[in-house]
Amino acid sequence: MDLRGQLKIKPDRLMRDLRDLAKIGKLTTGVSRTSLSNADLEARHWLLKRMADAGLKSTIDTVGNVHGQINTDAKSVIIGSHTDSVPVGGWLDGSLGVIYGLEIARTVLEAGYENTIGIHAISFMDEEGTYLACLGSRKFCQELSDDEIADGQNPAGEQLAHALDRAGLTSNPEIFLDSNAHIAYLEAHIEQGPRLEAERKAIGIVTGIVGIRRFRLEIRGEADHAGTVPMSMRKDAGTAAIRFSHRFLETVEGCKGADSVWNVGFVNFEPGAANVVPAKAELLYEIRDLDAVVLDRMESAIHDLCETANQTGLLQYEITKTIDITPSAMDSALSNNILDAAKNIGSPHMMMPSGAGHDAMVFARHIPSAMLFIPSIKGKSHSEAEDTSEKDIIVGCQVLAGSIEGIFST
């Protein structure tokens, strides 16, 4: 059966749901719905009711994932993202993909294809990492141990286990990925960057999600009076940190890949006074790329820098890797479905990597997965300035619906 062109979303309903969700935890033009906060839980129960009202089988599981399903006895595509936010976040980050899932499920029901197309729409808990990054998707995919959940806590020190109990979630049913029943995972998201807008493209088809490696550098010297000790006799950890960072930037530039990005994200000097030579410096460096080979090359170069610096014997340099996230390739067949759907409605599009992490990187380890991006105005995200034109929001949902048609067409 060729289903292409059969699923027509309702733009007014889509936008109304997005706007209504944005009222929960509202901050001027943005939202604050950190995981397991009152606003986050209110949003989850709002979504649960919206799913039930639309005719979906709706449930909240033990970690707060909100599930809405149609055609539960058939093969299903998971459409997911998250409704939690950073403390001062935007109204679309994560929420877009969740409401797309709800709207597409309703459209399938209204078109009379509930016995042909299986949809499992999910809002995952804590993608943003207030307690534990990608908590909901990792729990759903059975990647989390009880010990990891027990160790999770938010910046205020509240334990994850306590927060789940406080929210009344621990007695809820557990729901897990079934690789026999769940045939694919799709996630739509705002780009969170400027490339689509700059290229005047409405749709980004994600080729992969970058790997991330983060390093903490500690440099130890000696504190001295900054006015009385000659420059040539100092063991100045602060100046060493600045010089090392300059060499870091030059080095990664020289061994980068086409999609590499890097950052010096944190610098701290101790004791931190204008008239004291720093005895200690701490810095955080980060590198990202789609290719693990490129990341290996950049990481090796960073370690070589540290080894060379230590050979002077004047100061002590110690570098520690604190995060190592493997790059995730998106499924080419699913990506081609999104590409075809964009072409079918004449939507300008481009292939591109995701420089940010998403729940899709968890799913890519288990079932075929793909992502769709729509433009972010001025590239803004994780702030109240985050926004996307209504036209692009609607086009994105219709393209994702078209990709569902392609998956279930025979």
Image (tube, grey):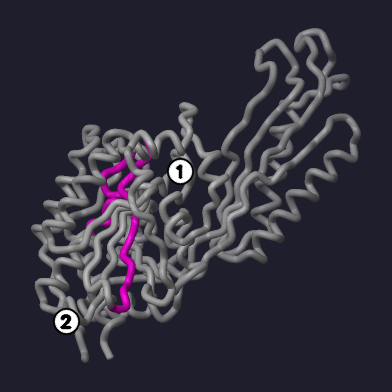
Contact, mark 1 vs mark 2 (Cβ under 8 Å): no
Measured along the vertical axis of the image, is residue 158 above or below residue 286? above
Residue 202 x, y percent position in the rendering:
27, 65
Question: Can you say which quadrant of the picture contains the C terminus?
Answer: bottom left
In the image, farthest residue toward the front: 171
Q: Residue at x 48, y 47 (%)?
A: 133
Residue type highlighted by circle 2: Gly
Residue 312 x, y percent position in the rendering:
90, 36
Query: Does residue 342 appear in this view?
Result: no
Is residue 229 shown left or right of residue 38? right
Q: CA distance from mark 1 to mark 2?
A: 38 Å
Q: Which quarter of the picture shows residue 118?
A: bottom left
In what element is the residue under mark 2?
A: loop
Question: Can you say which quadrant of the picture contains the N terminus?
Answer: bottom left
Return the residue at label 1.
129
Q: Residue at x 52, y 65 (%)?
A: 328
The disc placed on residue 5 is: 2
Measured along the vertical axis of the image, is residue 3 above or below residue 315? below
Residue 157 x, y percent position in the rendering:
49, 28
Q: Which quarter of the picture shows residue 169?
A: top left
In what element is the residue under mark 1?
A: loop
Residue type highlighted by circle 1: Gly
Q: Dot 1: within a 10 Å radius of its alpha carbon, few (fewer than 14), some, or many (20 or more) residues?
A: some
Judging depth in this view, the residue of 295 and 235 nearest the camera is: 295
Judging depth in this view, the residue of 85 and 389 nearest the camera is: 85
Q: Residue at x 39, y 53 (%)?
A: 193
Please give the range of residues in magenta.
Answer: 74-99
Q: Dot 2: within a 10 Å radius of its alpha carbon, few (fewer than 14), some, or many (20 or more) residues?
A: some
Query: Does residue 8 appear in this view?
Result: yes
Q: Is 83 within the magenta?
A: yes
Is residue 350 shown left or right of residue 92? right
Q: Residue at x 24, y 61 (%)?
A: 68
